[in-house]
Image: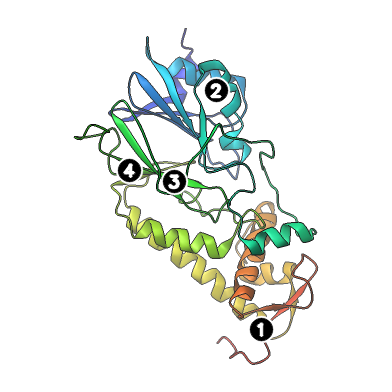
């Protein structure tokens, strides 16, 4: 029997696409994690969400009589997206598909930082996540009336995938055709947390550029409402990150500073509750700037480093 809570959590977004909202609201998840059910009959679940029994039952209750889950697709292994993957697989018999386990896709630089230790990170990471099947960049997954192309989009997380919906596997229209499921890479309500070593600002910007070059009708993010102006939203997020980068460079101009001082100058409007997340983003920007010889740490690029402009750089005005 479907409860009133299940009915409130379930929404038909367009023909062949349902959303079940997980009951995990927070400053980092907005109203909660969006779990998408794509197709009819044999259904793909995109981002099963957090490991909550109530959410598992809501997903199962969202299936019509005779429907089954054929695929479980995970954008990335943060617990609010991947935590329910294994329980849902056990309940339905469907395989779990993702780019790889936690840590897959890290750049050599981020892997070296992780091995070095002392840089923090690991917020909400599903350390034990292991998909049944690995999806390569560009690989196509298809079911009854739907087809998705996996797009490797590291940045928010090294194993992050977006899924682009296209025509059905037999040709013709497919469910959600022209939409992209963007996980936590592009959201309409907020920018993304980039927390090294799983977060990588250089990779994030490159992935934004990749999505910008791929026309989309609509974006379906992991949190928040659908985005009906994909190009505009991606451009706004790109400009936001470039503005933060400029603010950090300006903060470094007078003298070397530690991470807390840089964050205070570059994120002056951030409320205290979100200051730790702002520091992680600032740290990601600093690491990216250092990789481009635009900033340098006083020693190893850890949390205790003081940062300055390279000696021969031109001051930022």
Distance between mark 1 and mark 4 Cα atoms: 42 Å
Location of residue 144 in the rendering, given as x and y in whole percent from the top left corner = 31, 25
Which sits earlier in the primary sequence, circle 1 or circle 4?
4
Which sits earlier in the primary sequence, circle 2 or circle 1?
2
Is there CB contact under 8 Å for labels 1 and 3?
no
Distance between mark 2 and mark 4 Cα atoms: 25 Å
Residue at 44% from the left image edge and 46% from the top image edge: 162
Location of residue 159 in the rendering, given as x and y in whole percent from the top left corner = 56, 48
Q: Which mark is residue 309?
A: 1
Distance between mark 2 and mark 1 Cα atoms: 50 Å
Is there CB contact under 8 Å for labels 2 and 3?
no
Say which residue label 4 marks.
Answer: 179
Distance between mark 1 and mark 3 Cα atoms: 35 Å
Which sits earlier in the primary sequence, circle 4 or circle 3?
3
Q: Which mark is residue 89?
A: 2
Say which residue label 3 marks.
Answer: 162
Q: In this view, does 1 lie above or below 260?
A: above
Which sits earlier in the primary sequence, circle 1 or circle 3?
3
- Quadrant where the image shows the C terminus: bottom right
Image position of 277 (left or right of 185):
right
Q: Is mark 1 on a helix, strand or loop?
A: loop
Q: Is mark 4 on a helix, strand or loop?
A: strand
The foreground one among 238 and 287 is 287
């Amino acid at each position: 029997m479907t409860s009133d809570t299940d009915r409130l959590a379930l929404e038909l977004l367009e023909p062949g696409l349902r959303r079940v909202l997980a009951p995990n609201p927070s400053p980092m998840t907005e109203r909660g994690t969006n779990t998408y059910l794509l197709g009819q009959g044999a259904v793909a679940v995109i981002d099963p969400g957090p490991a909550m029994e109530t959410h598992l039952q809501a997903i199962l209750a969202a299936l019509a009589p005779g429907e089954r889950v054929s695929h479980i697709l995970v954008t990335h292994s943060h617990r609010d997206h991947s935590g329910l993957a294994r329980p849902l697989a056990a309940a339905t018999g469907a395989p779990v598909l993702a780019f790889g386990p936690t840590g897959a896709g890290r750049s050599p630089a981020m892997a070296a930082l992780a091995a070095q230790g002392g840089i923090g990170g690991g917020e909400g990471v599903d350390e034990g996540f292991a998909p049944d099947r690995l999806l390569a960049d560009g690989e196509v997954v298809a079911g009854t009336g739907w087809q998705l192309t996996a797009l490797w989009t590291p940045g928010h997380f090294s194993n992050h995938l977006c899924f682009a919906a296209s025509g059905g596997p037999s040709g013709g229209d497919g469910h959600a055709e022209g939409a992209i499921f963007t996980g936590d890479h592009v959201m309409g309500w907020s920018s993304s947390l980039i927390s090294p070593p799983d977060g990588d600002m250089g990779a994030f910007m490159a992935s934004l550029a990749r999505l910008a070059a791929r026309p989309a009708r609509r974006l379906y993010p992991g949190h928040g409402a659908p985005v009906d102006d994909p190009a505009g939203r991606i451009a706004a997020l790109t400009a936001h990150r470039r503005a933060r980068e400029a603010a950090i460079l300006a903060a470094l101009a007078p003298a070397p500073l530690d991470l807390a001082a840089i964050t205070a100058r570059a994120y002056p409007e951030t409320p205290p509750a979100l200051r730790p997340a702002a520091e992680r983003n600032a740290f990601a920007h600093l690491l990216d700037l250092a990789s481009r010889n635009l900033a340098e740490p006083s020693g190893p690029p850890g949390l205790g480093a003081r940062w300055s402009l390279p000696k021969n750089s031109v001051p930022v005005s």
